[in-house]
Image (cartoon, rainbow, N blue to C red):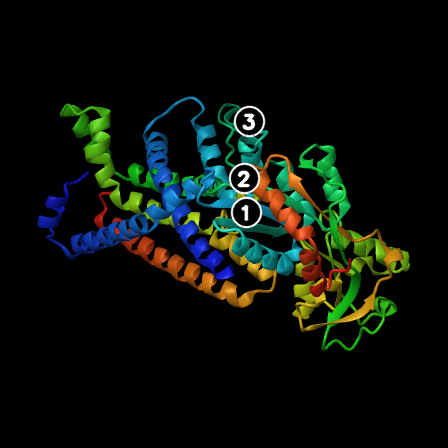
Amino acid sequence: MVSYKKMHNNIKTYGDFMLKKTFHSLLFFLFLTITFFHTNILAQEKSGYTDKQNEELLISAAISLKDVMQEFGEEFEKNNINTKIFFNFASSGQLRTQIENGAPVDVFISASTKDMDYLDKKKLIVEKDGKIFAKNKLVLIANNRNKDVYSLSDLKSSAIKKIAIGNPDNVPAGKYAEEALAYFKILSGIKEKLVFTENVRQVLNYVSKNEVDAGVVFYTDTKIDKNVKIIFTFPSEAHKPIIYPIALVKSSKNSTLAKKFIEFVISAQGKKKLKSYGFVN
Amino acid sequence: MLNESIFFSIRLTFQVALIATIFVTIFGIIIGYVLATKKFYGKIFVDIIVTLPLILPPTVIGYYLLLIFGKYGVIGSVIFKFTGWNIMFTWWSCVLASFIVSLPLMVKTVEAAIKSIDKSMIDTSYTLGYSEIETLLKIVLPLAKNGIMAGIVLAFARSMGEFGATLMLAGNIPGKTNTMALSIYSLVTNGEWSRAHCLVLILTLTSALFVLVTYKLNQKRLASKTS
C-alpha cells in the first residue's frame, strides 16, 4: 500500500487532495462504526450464552396476539428481574415453518390447532394438550367510510372489487375466512376479488387504509384499529373453532423460564388480561 | 419496547454491513485479481457463479443458502453435528446473506480496475525481480485503489439494503435479527408508518451519501487513468 506519509507529503494536485479527503472520511466513518458498535458486537455474543445475569426467552406468537402478548411480556419482565422477553410475531404457519427449520424459539403460540398439531407430530413441542388458553371470533370488516358494504351478501355486488383475507396456506385467519365464506355459499362468487395477505394484521391494515373494500379478521383485531367497523360476526358453526394453544418448544434452552411464562399466560390473571382484549374464554 | 427495537435495527444493520464488507473486501480482491489476471479451465463457471447473485431474485439466493447452511443443509448439518450451533436465525446469517449479494459488486469492480492497469507496469515489476505477491501488494492494489474503494462503498451500501435472502435465513426477530430493511417491511405491513418513516429516512440519506462517494471515486479513477 502506498505509504501514508508519502501520500500526505506528496499532495501535488487537487485530485490528490480530494482522494486524501475521501480516504480520510471513509477511514473516519469506519473508525466511528467500529468504536461505536464493537461493544455491542460483544454484547450480542454474550446473550447467546446462558448468562445468569440476563435470561432470555424467544416467543413465537400468532400476530393477532401482538398487543396482549406485549403486555404479558412487560409484566413478566417486571415480575422476574433479569429476564428479557423477545417476541416474534407472524402468521402461525410462518412461525411453524421457522421452528421446523430449527429456529431457537422457546414458546410457540398459534391461532389454530393445525400448526401446533403439525409440530407435535414432528415431536418438536412438549405437552401441547390442555394448554388452550384463549378463543376468538371471526368478523367481516370494512372501512368506516365505506358506503357499499352493509351485509355479507353485499360482497357479491359489483361495487365491491377487493376483499382481503389471510393466505389460507399459512394464515389461520385466512383458513377460517375461507371456511366461513364457503359455509354461507359466497366463496365461489367472490373468489376473483380475494386478496391474500401474509398475516391477519395486514388484512386489518389494508381495510384501515381503504386499499380494499372489505376484509375478514378476528374480533380482537378490530379493537385496536379505530378506522374499521364490523359488518358481520360469523357464527361459530361457520368455521372450525378458533382456539389458541400454547406450548413449550422441545429445543428450548431455557425451559424452566419458558414454563414459568406459560403458567403466567394461562393463570387467572392472564385470563383477565385476555378478556380485556376481547379474547373470549 | 418498540423504540428499543428501532435503535437495535439501526445498530444491527451497520454492524452487519461492516462485517460483511470486511469479508467481501478480502474475498472480492482475491477473486477479482484471479479473474482479471489468470487463465484456467472452468474460469467462465467461476465467473458465472460469482456474478449470479447480482441477477438472481433474492428469494432464489435465500433458497440456496437455506439448502446449504440450514439446520439440515449440506454444510449446516455438519456444523450442527460438531458444534450444536446453526447460523439460521442469528445475526451471522444476515452477514452471510449480505456477503453473498455484495461479493459480485466487489469482484466486478476490482476486476475492471485491475484489468485497466497498464500491463507494462506489472511486467516491469516482474522483470525487476518482485514475486507475484509483492507485485500484487505494492503495484497492482495501489494502482487499483480507486476501484477497490468504489467496490467497498458499493458493497457496504448493498449490504445495508439486503432484504429477501436475509428474511429467509434470519427470520425477522425483533431484538435479534431485524435489520432496517426487515423492520420497515414489518412496520409497513402492520400499518405502523410513522415508525417506518425514521428508518426509511436514515436508509435513504446513507444510500444517497454512498452514491455521492462512489461518483466522486469514479471521477477520480477516470481522471487519473492509471487505474
- Separation (CA) of disc 2 from disc 3: 19 Å
First of labels 2, 3 by sequence position: 2
Q: Is residue A138 above or below residue B42?
A: below
Extreme residue toward the left, this view: A9
In the figure, is residue B102 to the left or right of A23? Answer: right
Going 24% across and 37% down the picture, which residue do you hit?
B141
Mark 1 and mark 2 in contact? Answer it, CB < 8 Å: yes
Q: Which numbered tag is attached to residue B61?
A: 2
Q: Quadrant of the C terminus of chain B?
A: top left
In the figure, is residue A254 to the left or right of B220? Answer: right
Residue bearing mark 1:
B164
- Separation (CA) of disc 1 from disc 2: 8 Å
In the figure, is residue B154 to the left or right of A233? Answer: left
Going 44% across and 54% down the picture, which residue do you hit?
B8
Element class at badge 2: helix
Q: Amino acid at mark 2?
A: Ile
Q: Is residue A123 above or below residue A223?
A: above
Tag 1, which chain? B
Q: Which numbered tag is attached to residue B77?
A: 3
Answer few, some or many: residues within 10 Å of disc 3's Cα (few below 14, many 20 plus, some between 14 and 19).
Answer: some
Q: Are marks 2 and 3 on the same chain?
A: yes
Q: Amino acid at mark 3?
A: Ser
Element class at badge 3: helix
